[in-house]
Amino acid sequence: MYNIDLNEIEKMLSHCSQHNQILNSRTVISSAYLTPYKKPEFSLTINDYRPHHGYVCDTVQKLLDSVKIGVRKWDSSVFASASGQEKEIHPSYFVPHACDIPSISTDQACETLSRYSHLVFVGDSLMRHLRQALFILLRNHGLVRGGIQTSTFIDMCQCDGQFSGHGVCRLNNGVFNGGTKGEMDVCGGENYNVFKYKGYEWPENGFDFWDGIDCADPNQGSILFVAQGGVHHGNNADVTYRQLIAPHMSHPQFQKCAMHHKLSPIYIGFYAQSLNLDKPYPAQSRVNGRIFNDQMNALLQSSEFYLLDVLNFTTDSQSSDGFHKLMDVNLFLMYYVLNLADMLFVTSFDAAN
């Protein structure tokens, strides 16, 4: 069921347990001076990879429910019973509800992605980190540096540091924002079909993507469209829907792709921030997060979108700054997205035939 090489994963876990570091946005870096930075415990553990139920989520709804209702756990009962703010600084792992969502190998990820002709990711800095996790996965689970494209200070951005808030850990060589699988240097060989990847980060919303698409053309393949947003829309579900989601849904080519069963659209819901940010950022609180996700679910009910509710998944997880999550959340969320994408492709293929 879990087809990744756990021996290799354990080697990288061992390395990151000793070399994990996170630069914040205020860290001063120069040849002569480096301000102190955090060296927390690595967020990923071997328990993240272990099955918990012995039964794989085999339908779209079971997968969505397993993420929405699942719970986060800690190895130590001391941490499990601690306050939220205490929990957040220690490694944990997420247990999906009722069924397991497989971790997948690089080859399996390439097989899923090559079923699509286009991969489109639209969102803010949270989505940027999720896209980094995609590169980590496609680079043979390069937990140490796989998500960093270009940086003179790459050794300072390893392990969880790949999701640091500092600018030196955000540099990229261009393909991070878009390219073919060949230009990205992933999924090589003749076993995988060519696909194109495009990432949009707020304030870009990706509305122009559809101008080059025609799903009535038999040569046009399927599109995996993953959207996320809310913080830059006042953490208001209605505003996010009207300004981010509805313009995509109303585009004629979006509608045509849906009609021809060539579209798998996923919306990733509200992330849980650290409790110590609730006072300065009350609109981003977990209470508002539940309201946001419930309202967004209602808005998307009659649409083609599938809502991946990640509030429980991200609650009390480690972060770089109280808001941006680390390796465990980003990598496993990408596993969830790709498992869902695989199911949605099969569903669309069956509907088209």
Image: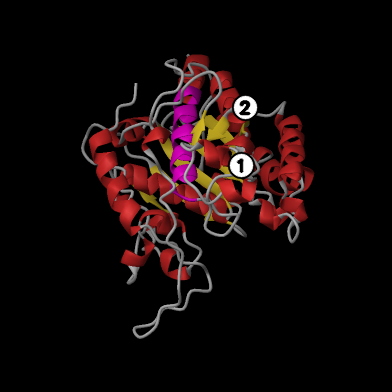
Q: Amino acid at mark 2?
A: Ile
**Place of residue 162 in the rendered image (x, y in percent of width and height, measured from the top left):** 41, 57
Q: CA distance from mark 2 to mark 1?
A: 12 Å
**Place of residue 80 in the rendered image (x, y in percent of width and height, measured from the top left):** 56, 38
Q: Amino acid at mark 1?
A: Thr
The local crowd at label 2, few if under 14, some if 14 to 19, many if 20 or more residues have their Cα within 10 Å, is some
Q: Quadrant of residue 9?
A: top left
Report whether residue 183 is seen. Answer: no
Q: Is residue 273 left or right of residue 340?
A: right
Q: Secondary structure at mark 1?
A: loop
* Residue denoted by label 1: 315
Image quadrant for the N terminus?
top left
Question: In this picture, is 101 found above or below 142?
Answer: above
Report whether residue 8 is seen. Answer: yes
Which is nearer the eye, 345 or 143? 143
Q: Main secondary structure of the magenta part?
A: helix
Q: Secondary structure at mark 2?
A: helix
Q: Is residue 280 left or right of residue 150?
A: right
Q: Is residue 275 left or right of residue 350?
A: right
Please report the residue visible at 64 percent of the width from the left and 42 percent of the height from the top.
248
The magenta segment: 326-344
Which is nearer the eye, 234 or 31? 31
The number of numbered discs placed on residues in the rendered structure image is 2
* Residue denoted by label 2: 69
Please report the residue visible at 55 percent of the width from the left and 35 percent of the height from the top.
72
Who comes first in sequence, dot 2 or dot 1?
A: 2
Question: In this picture, is 156 found above or below 217?
Answer: below
